[in-house]
Image (cartoon, rainbow, N blue to C red):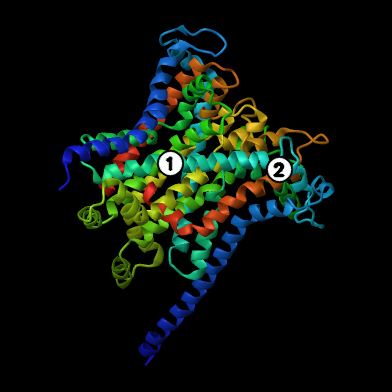
Amino acid sequence: MRNTRSRKITGFFLLTPALGFVLAFTAYPFLHMMWMSLHNWSIIEPKKYVGFRNYVRIFDDGQFWVSLGFTVKYTLWITPILMVLGFLIALLTAANTPIKRFTRGVVFIPVVIGLGVSSLLWYWLFSYDFGLINRALLDVGLISKPVVWFGVSAELVMWAVIVSVVWKVVGFGMLLFVAAIQSIPQDINDAAKVDGARYWMRVRKVTLPMTLKTILLVTLVSIIGSLLAFDQFYIMTAGQPHNATATSVFWVYLNSFPYLKLGYGSALSFILALIVLACTIVQMMLTRRSYG
Amino acid sequence: MIAVQQRLRVPGSARIMQRRTGYLVAAICVALCTIMIMPLALTILASLKTTLEAAALPPTYVPHEMSFDSYVKLWNYQAGLVTYVANSGITACLTIVFCLALTIPAGYALARFPVPGKEVIFVILLLALIIPYQALLTPIFFMFIQLKLTNSLIGLAIVHTAIQLPFSVYIMRNAFESVPSELDEAATVDGCSSWQSLLFVYIPSIRPAIVTVSLFAFITSWNEFLGALVMMSRGSAFTLPIVLAAARTETSLGGTDWGLLQAGITISIVPCVLFYLLLQKYYVSGLLSGAVK
């Protein structure tokens, strides 16, 4: 047909901008980050090669472990809540009746707004004196004096944040689950019905196994997202009390930017990237197996 | 006789059960919608309180009197609302432009040209999927200081494009692949060059992908927080989420100005919800194909 050689050249030419962009703003920063992590690097002072000392320091950095521990704890709590709620809502609304479609649309609305903005919104709702949550709980009589949600107990802070984030992202899982449930062939369900299987039995024996891959996928997306949590804690808790709720990304942020310890921040970033990478590889293996 | 009655009764009671379940499901749906809408509705209502009522204790659920006090205050807040909306809006538009300009040619090449090592190139383009941008901000910040791209909307749009690129490349490649190659071949027979078939054959056929890529680029950029927080240190360069987060700790009369914050939250939410309602189809299909990669 057309001259293959000139097609090759044209094709390569078309790919150059995107390729150049990724090399400049993703690949190069990544390599540079590894280089920076081997130095004491701040903008004000000249950089100094320190070998792996930054990495050794991470192991002795109490706050790093507190942050990682808190992030993992947050992830371990919020992920199952998101999965179970998302799946239940999907079961409830999977049929295409008007009211169910409408409910789906409404549940999804918070997904499109920003996490930063939704965190501000909940920061107000949970506020000690001006928040409507304390007001409502007082009015109903569940509490006798306002609860200090933020800044005192790391436990309470975590639950307030979890409520806000579940509200914000539960629609994401729901949407993917609904798509998976709708793609189950109807005759399988009909066959189970003829065999006398009741609703919850069918959920357990048909729906769950047939949507397992989607469930695993959404679980991993949620785990990765939670391990990288920042906005909600920066806005709602600012890491308080005593940096007990400063997540891993928060600790990277504090070191790199307010403290300008770019070398140490790079080392922390690299460790963080490795942790997330491990999760992503599992996710990719799952998607490849199910779709390729 | 008894057996017949029972056989007749079973479907009857089943129907009643079914109707009951139907009512229950509808009731749960209504409750769920209420819970999901409540925080948004309360915020929008609270943004319409008078200054006095916004600072009242205990807080009121709904305003007794409507007023645009908070919006007026927000309009004049520091550099002015227009500045922050413009910063967010321009960054989002630049992100859309960058994403389209980079991924339309790339998608075309990946789908239709015999480029050697295409698979490897595709994987490289998806690199940002495995490296979280949160971890890259430290080196990018350092790079941007040297390139004078901190406090620059172009710089921030570059960060947002880097976040959004893998998704966009993926959507574009699929869109180009799903255009029947007979169309392209017919165009070639008619004497179209590669460029002409891109313009006249492909671009019209991949319009949905262009909408999807633009929509997600807009939402990502408009809402993005950490990158903007790191890159923008000058107050007049702040985007909407950043200035609101800063206003949270600003004091007016000794406390957070909740009315101002609520007005700001409302303004930031409006475009996202509007685009979602208008372009729901693209949103859902993009999310479904993006999530399964």
Report, in whole angstroms, how far the alpha carbon at label 2 lies from the one at label 1. Answer: 31 Å
The answer to whether A207 is drawn above or below residue B258 in the figure is below
How many residues crowd mark 2 within 10 Å: few (<14), some (14–19), many (20+)? many
Q: Looking at numbered disc 2 in the image, what kind of residue is underneath it?
A: Leu
Most foreground residue, B72 or A55: B72
- Give coordinates of residue B107: x percent, y percent: 32, 44
Judged from this view, the residue extending furthest toward the left is A1
- Name the residue located 46 percent from the left edge and 13 percent from the top edge: A54
Kind of element beneath mark 2 = helix
Most foreground residue, B14 or A161: A161
Query: Is residue A6 shown to the viewer in this render?
Result: yes
Kind of element beneath mark 1 = helix
Left or right, residue A16 beside residue A3: right
The answer to whether A219 is drawn above or below residue A211 in the figure is above
- Give coordinates of residue B194: x percent, y percent: 27, 46
Q: Chain of mark 1?
A: B
Q: Looking at numbered disc 1 in the image, what kind of residue is underneath it?
A: Cys
Residue A122, by quadrant, is top right
- Name the residue located 80 percent from the left edge and 36 percent from the top edge: B252
* Circle on res. A97: none
For label 1, the residue is B99
For label 2, the residue is B261
- Name the residue located 58 percent from the left edge and 38 percent from the top edge: A232
- Give coordinates of residue B108: x percent, y percent: 30, 45
